[in-house]
Image (cartoon, grey):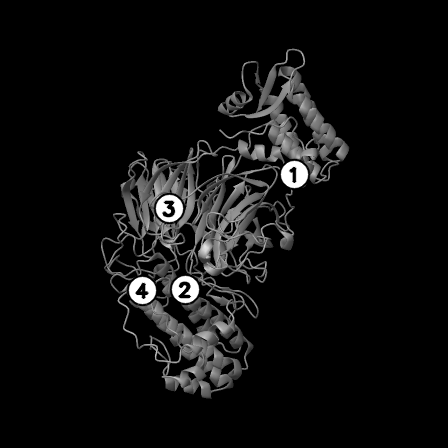
């Protein structure tokens, strides 16, 4: 089990000494590009230099046997791709098939199983007992064979979305294989809001359209020549969960149509004027992120970023589109938790090119951050990995997810060989990096780096294209406190597919209150005097029990309501008041006595869905006592 | 990820790289026996194809007076040159013959024409016709020829996937897909420029 750091007091005020120690140990504050420790890291596939800040590498695992080419580590036929999560399992997709890691102990990931099934990209999603798998390459075979398909037209070829029944994980059974004209580069699961027995899959095909002799009706001709072209659309697969073998394409929405019905209604490709980026034509979505609780999806669709109404999931409707002269290829999208901000990424260079050099423009190959107000998107800023990378490192904005810190919008993101970066975009106009992990270049100019990096139940999991599988955890810095990390870790998901964004709700907990206190200290959102008193009151209340605690918390909540009217950050003070009020009605601290080790007590806390909070040695009887916080 | 796509803002490879390539290109490039591997033949052919785009953009620098045309040429130059570098590395890694076609008209004239003729490529006469043009006439001719040239790349990709045993390597698959996507995008842009030469393409 990972050894949990149990801090006696958890506010930033009290933690000042610890922060000083971190800086003394040599950690660098971010956003100082040229003296950044990531500059000049030594190259090597297995022994590259490493720089990190605010993150710790908990574990790393190389690729499973058979999932790499011993003669060429960078062989792209064996590239790892995206991740999906369920329980303690991480499904790591790839061009050669998938590997499944058991991370019950995140410090010791165990290879649970593998399945060889080549065809790329191999982006996975998991839903109940079903695993979904994207295939686009012409070598993909219906039977998952590695031999490829020799004939140019063949019934053996598979390009589309595979569906495996993983009820017996040791023996996944392909129960459906839904063929599409352009194959599936990525896909997105969309639960039916009115029927829990039905799941939809949005298929984003970006590849060459296959011959109609192989799949009837496929046409790659421009829409002016063929109104039924397979370009300029996505496909929607309907999956009856009780009978997934009956999964089939039920619609092919023309998401880019204009008001006249012309299917090529958005960006037609090209430059936007002198000295702009050259933006791809909008004839495909690369990735669609759905947010079902909000009834909305964000599509990153090559030449445009779009918003989609998904309340009728089989018939999604575009409600907004944006264009940006700095974007080459709209690649992926992520909402903040209240869906008032949307981050779109630009995969300038396609991921295989070095686009984070000091000579590359900071707003090219970056994240574009938009404010969202219903159907309206307004550009706010760009965020790009601040540390320049070498020309030997393919690097551009890529896949990531939210880190659920209450009161802040924070995202962890992979930048290929630029590594993993964590940034705050609470103010969409002022994104700021707060943590990073980077390795030096791969040997032999190989393409690689992190395909994706996602937060899942307290840890960050990175899918490395060549090097394998990484587990990281956040460590406290001046930009992120232990309370904020603990509060994020309280959010537990049974299943997570990054393109199916869940709404995050935090339980009433002292760590959530502590996170808000830390934020008010950091941003001076409440007077120093008051916030120090609030921290002391919270600390005291936590050590009370029953009615005493209840009244202390109620009193504090009322005071905070009053504080809010004069606070610089009234919203945050009110959020803190709400948490304190919730705590006052539902607080239930648990103590542990003698004969129980710290580790055992911590484990018991976790088993109850709470987090270990503090250890104190009582002078009276020398007993160790630990409290668990929700 | 689309690994092979390269669209740099500024030239990633120095001109010297191509001068060196040209210097060793003083001989017929299609003299060697055809490689039995269709993927290798595709890459070798695409190097010839891309190299001629460099010949054409080199002509543009002294013949067009239109800023948009110079920008277009710079982008084509950078992307084709970048891809040539990728293709050379791929062939080298497989110990296959790496073609060294001419990348300027002078080199072309200096030795047996244009090397291997691929779909969409200009004949010697067409190259001379382009070289003899200037101003608006050059722009029109350049766009017309370059659209045809790029369409040839699409034909090559189609032919690749219509060849048994071809395109089964992940890198080749991605590279061919990206060539297809990129050249389509550039064709669309050049068609816009051809029909509306007085104003740059507008956003919709």
> Which residue is most to the bottom?
B132
Marks 3 and 1, how far apart in space?
46 Å
Residue A622 visible in this rendered orientation of the protein: yes
Discs 3 and 1 share one subunit = yes
Q: Chain of mark 2?
A: B
Residue B39, numbered label? 4
Foreground: B75 or A581?
Answer: B75
Discs 2 and 4 share one subunit = yes
Which residue carries the number 2 mark?
A: B89
Q: Chain of mark 3?
A: A
Q: How many marks?
A: 4
Q: Nearer the viewer, mark 1 or mark 4?
A: 1
Do the residues bearing badges 2 and 4 touch, measured as CB atoms within 8 Å?
A: no
Q: Is residue A177 above or below residue A18?
A: below
Marks 2 and 4, how far apart in space?
14 Å
Which residue carries the number 3 mark?
A: A201
Secondary element type, mark 3: strand
Residue A22, numbered label? 1
Q: Nearer the viewer, mark 3 or mark 1?
A: 1
Instruction: Point out residue A581 in the picture as x, y percentages from the top left corner.
Output: 63, 26
Q: Nearer the viewer, mark 4 or mark 3?
A: 4
- Name the residue rendered at 61%, 14% in the picture: A623
Q: Chain of mark 4?
A: B
Secondary element type, mark 2: helix
- For marks 2 and 4, the one nearer the N-term is 4
Q: Chain of mark 1?
A: A
Q: Is residue A577 above or below residue A594?
A: below
For disc 1, the neighbor class at 10 Å (few under 14, some 14 to 19, many from 20) is some
């Amino acid at each position: 089990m990972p050894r949990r750091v149990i801090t006696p007091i958890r506010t930033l005020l009290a933690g000042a000494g610890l922060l000083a120690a971190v800086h003394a140990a040599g950690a660098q504050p971010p956003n100082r590009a040229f003296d950044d420790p990531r500059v000049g890291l030594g190259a090597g596939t297995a022994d590259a230099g490493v720089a990190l800040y605010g993150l710790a590498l908990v574990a790393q695992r190389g690729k499973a046997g058979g999932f790499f080419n011993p003669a060429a580590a960078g062989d792209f036929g064996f590239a790892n791709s995206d991740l999906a999560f369920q329980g303690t399992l991480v499904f790591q997709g790839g061009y050669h098939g998938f590997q499944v890691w058991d991370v019950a102990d995140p410090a010791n990931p165990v290879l649970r199983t593998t399945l060889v099934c080549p065809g790329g990209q191999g982006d996975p999603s998991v839903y109940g007992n079903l695993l979904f798998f994207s295939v686009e390459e012409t070598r993909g075979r219906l039977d998952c064979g590695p031999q490829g398909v020799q004939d140019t037209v063949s019934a053996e070829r598979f390009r589309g979305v595979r569906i495996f029944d993983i009820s017996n994980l040791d023996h996944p059974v392909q129960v459906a294989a839904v063929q599409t004209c352009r194959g599936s580069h990525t896909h997105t699961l969309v639960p039916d809001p009115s029927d829990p027995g039905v799941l939809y899959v949005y298929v984003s095909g970006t590849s060459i359209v296959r011959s109609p002799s192989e799949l009837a009706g496929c046409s790659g001709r421009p829409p002016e020549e063929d109104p039924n072209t397979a370009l300029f659309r996505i496909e929607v697969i309907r999956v009856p969960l009780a009978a997934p073998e009956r999964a089939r394409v039920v619609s092919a929405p023309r998401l880019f149509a204009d008001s006249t019905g012309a299917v090529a209604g958005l960006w037609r490709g090209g430059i936007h004027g002198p000295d702009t980026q050259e933006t791809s034509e909008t004839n495909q979505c690369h990735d669609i992120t759905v947010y079902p609780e909000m009834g909305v999806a964000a599509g990153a669709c090559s030449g445009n970023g779009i918003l989609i109404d998904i309340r009728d999931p089989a018939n999604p409707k575009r409600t907004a589109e944006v264009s940006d002269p700095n974007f080459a290829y709209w690649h992926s999208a992520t909402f903040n938790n209240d869906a008032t901000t949307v981050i779109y990424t630009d995969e300038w260079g396609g991921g295989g090119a070095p686009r984070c050099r000091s000579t590359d423009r900071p707003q090219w190959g970056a994240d574009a951050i938009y404010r969202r107000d219903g159907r309206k998107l307004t550009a706010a800023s760009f965020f790009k990995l601040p540390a320049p990378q070498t020309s030997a490192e393919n690097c551009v904005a890529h896949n990531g997810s939210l880190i659920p810190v209450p009161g802040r919008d924070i995202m962890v993101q992979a930048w290929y060989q630029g590594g993993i970066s964590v940034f705050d975009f609470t103010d969409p106009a002022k994104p700021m990096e707060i943590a990073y992990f980077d390795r030096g270049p791969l040997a032999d100019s190989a393409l690689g780096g992190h395909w994706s990096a996602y937060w899942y139940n307290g840890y960050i999991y990175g899918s490395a294209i060549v090097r394998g599988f990484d587990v990281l955890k956040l460590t406290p810095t001046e930009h992120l406190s232990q309370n904020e990390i603990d509060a994020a870790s309280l959010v537990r998901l049974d299943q997570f597919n990054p393109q199916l964004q869940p709404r995050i709700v935090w339980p009433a907990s002292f760590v959530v209150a502590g996170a808000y206190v830390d934020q008010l200290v950091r941003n001076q959102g409440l007077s120093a005097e008051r916030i120090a008193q609030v921290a002391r009151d919270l600390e005291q209340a936590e050590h009370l029990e029953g009615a005493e605690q209840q009244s202390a918390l109620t009193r504090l909540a009322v005071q905070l309501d009053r504080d809010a009217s004069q606070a610089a950050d009234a919203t945050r003070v009110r959020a803190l008041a709400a948490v304190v009020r919730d705590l006052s009605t539902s607080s239930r601290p648990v103590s542990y006595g003698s004969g129980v080790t710290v580790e055992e007590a911590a484990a018991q806390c976790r088993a109850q869905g709470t987090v270990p909070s503090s250890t104190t040695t009582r002078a009276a009887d020398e007993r160790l006592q630990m409290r668990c916080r929700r | 990820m689309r690994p092979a796509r390269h669209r740099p803002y500024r030239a990633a490879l120095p001109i010297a790289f191509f001068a060196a390539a040209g210097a060793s290109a003083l001989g017929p490039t299609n003299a060697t026996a055809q490689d039995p591997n269709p993927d290798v033949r595709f890459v070798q052919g695409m190097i010839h194809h891309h190299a001629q785009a460099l010949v054409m953009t080199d002509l543009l620098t002294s013949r067009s007076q239109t800023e948009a045309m110079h920008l277009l040429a710079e982008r084509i130059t950078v992307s084709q040159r970048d891809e040539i570098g990728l293709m050379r590395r791929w062939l080298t890694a497989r110990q296959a013959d790496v073609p060294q076609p001419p990348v300027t008209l002078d080199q072309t004239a200096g030795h047996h024409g244009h090397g291997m003729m691929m779909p969409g490529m200009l004949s010697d006469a067409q190259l001379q016709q382009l070289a003899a043009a200037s101003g608006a006439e050059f722009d029109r001719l350049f766009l017309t020829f370059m659209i045809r040239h790029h369409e040839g790349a699409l034909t090559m990709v189609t032919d690749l996937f219509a060849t048994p045993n071809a395109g089964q390597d992940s890198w080749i698959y991605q590279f061919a897909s990206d060539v297809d996507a990129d050249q389509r995008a550039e064709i669309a842009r050049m068609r816009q420029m051809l029909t509306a030469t007085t104003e740059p393409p507008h956003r919709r």
